[in-house]
Amino acid sequence: MFLLLILTLGIFAPRDTGAQSVTQPDVHVTVSEGAPLELRCNYSSSGTPYLFWYMQHPNQGLQFLLKYFSGDTLVKGIKGFEAEFKNHETTFHLRKSRALGSDAAKYFCAVRDTVSGTAGGDEHKPPW
């Protein structure tokens, strides 16, 4: 077994229409190697939400996993991760069918209600 550490990361932005935020209700999740993995993310946004998942291994920077802007609600990311955008439930849970030992890390869900300059890799930068 290995431990995946989940930290809450709230993104707040002063805007005329309100602020957006995320909540990751699980402080930590323990998963057996080879077992399915789900990391929960609940969001609120006053506008159109743009959602992101990142991971961070000890002593390393954030690694972009996937993003949702619009279109298909099931988003495929790198390393076998995927997330499903459910607007009516305001959730964007990260999933992987078979967890690996190398998946032990901190995971961050982020939201923003506008995206500027997604060309050129800006989506790989945290949206704060």
Image: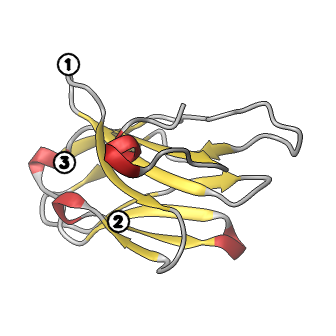
Q: Residue furthest bottom?
A: 72
Where is mark 1, residue-wise? 59
Kindly report the distance in space between the C-alpha atoms of the residues bearing marks 1 and 2: 24 Å
x and y percentages locating residue 56 in the rendered image: 28, 34
Secondary element at tag 1: loop
Residue 75 to residue 110: above or below? below
Q: Amino acid at mark 3?
A: Asp
> What residue appears at the point 50 percent right and 46 percent down from the top-left corner?
26
> What residue appears at the point 71 percent right and 75 percent down from the top-left corner?
88
Where is mark 2, residue-wise? 95
Q: Earlier in the sequence, mark 2 or mark 3?
A: 2
Secondary element at tag 2: strand
x and y percentages locating residue 3 in the rendered image: 25, 41
Q: Quadrant of the C terminus?
A: top right
Of discs 3 and 1, which sits in the foreground? 1
Q: Amino acid at mark 2?
A: Arg
Residue 104 can be seen, yes or no = yes
- What numbered label is drawn on residue 103? 3
Within 10 Å of disc 1 (Cα), the crowding (few <14, some 14-19, many 20+) is few
Residue 29 can be seen, yes or no = no
- The front one of 14 and 43 is 14
Kindly report the distance in space between the C-alpha atoms of the residues bearing marks 2 and 3: 12 Å
Relative side of 111 to 12, left or right: left
